Image (cartoon, grey):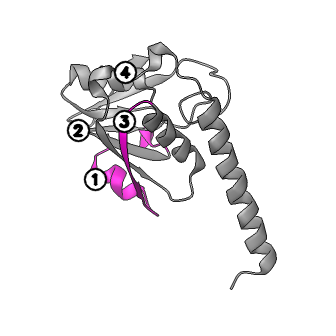
Amino acid sequence: MPKKSHKIKLYILLVIAALGGLYYYNNSSVNAADALDPSLKGKKVTVYKSPTCGCCANYISYLRKNGLEVEVVNENDVTKTKEKYRIPADLYSCHTTIIDDYFVEGHIPLKAINKLLTEKPDILGIGMPGMPSGSPGMPGKKLSLFLIDAVDKDGNINSYFEL
């Protein structure tokens, strides 16, 4: 049984994470260049994430705020999902989104998701490793180009999109 002081510290951390997510959600602006293609409004997506990840919650808010219908699946071990969808370890991020037959790994902006879903390339999915500052769901300013890769059916990683 955790000590009372540990419970209080955990509670404080959870409150801080929730407030941070609320702040991000209410203060993030989505410009027209990063808006969801109108033909994709209401599209169902599934996000697999750790139950304790705050930036994943921010990304989910970003998706919902822009018109996607998001189902959230909390997993203690997200690696199993990444392996199931054949996501190369070089592209791992904190969460995996499944849209139609594609994986979208990480904090991918809507502009890249629009490209994926309107062009429908013959690939497994797209990914942007890590959690770049200023990407959807991540605080801070964008410090460099977002380099988004595609994974073909043979598991090869190729450049897909730069934002």
Q: Is residue 12 left or right of residue 57?
A: right
- Asked if the residues shown at circle 4 and circle 1 are in contact, with their CB atoms under 8 angstroms apart, the answer is no
Badge 3 density bin: few <14, some 14–19, many ≥20, Cα 10 Å = some
Q: For mark 1, what is the residue? A: 84
Q: For mark 4, what is the residue? A: 159
State the extent of the magenta-drawn residues as a range.
66-93
Q: Which amino acid, mark 2?
A: Asp
Q: Is residue 74 left or right of residue 53?
A: left
Examine the image and state in which quarter residue 55 appears: top right
- For the N terminus, the image quarter is bottom right
Q: Is residue 108 left or right of residue 123?
A: right
Residue at 62% across, 44% down = 21
- Asked if the residues shown at circle 3 and circle 2 are in contact, with their CB atoms under 8 angstroms apart, the answer is no
- Asked if the residues shown at circle 4 and circle 3 are in contact, with their CB atoms under 8 angstroms apart, the answer is no
Considering only order in the chain, which callout, 1 or 4, is on the residue closer to the N terminus?
A: 1
Report the Cα–Cα distance between label 2 and label 4: 21 Å
Considering only order in the chain, which callout, 4 or 2, is on the residue closer to the N terminus?
A: 2
Q: For mark 2, what is the residue? A: 100
Residue at 53% across, 47% down = 57
Q: Residue furthest right?
A: 5
Report the Cα–Cα distance between label 4 and label 3: 25 Å
**In the image, is residue 70 part of the stretch drawn in magenta?**
yes
Considering only order in the chain, which callout, 2 or 3, is on the residue closer to the N terminus?
A: 3
Q: Where's residue 140, x and y in %?
A: 68, 29
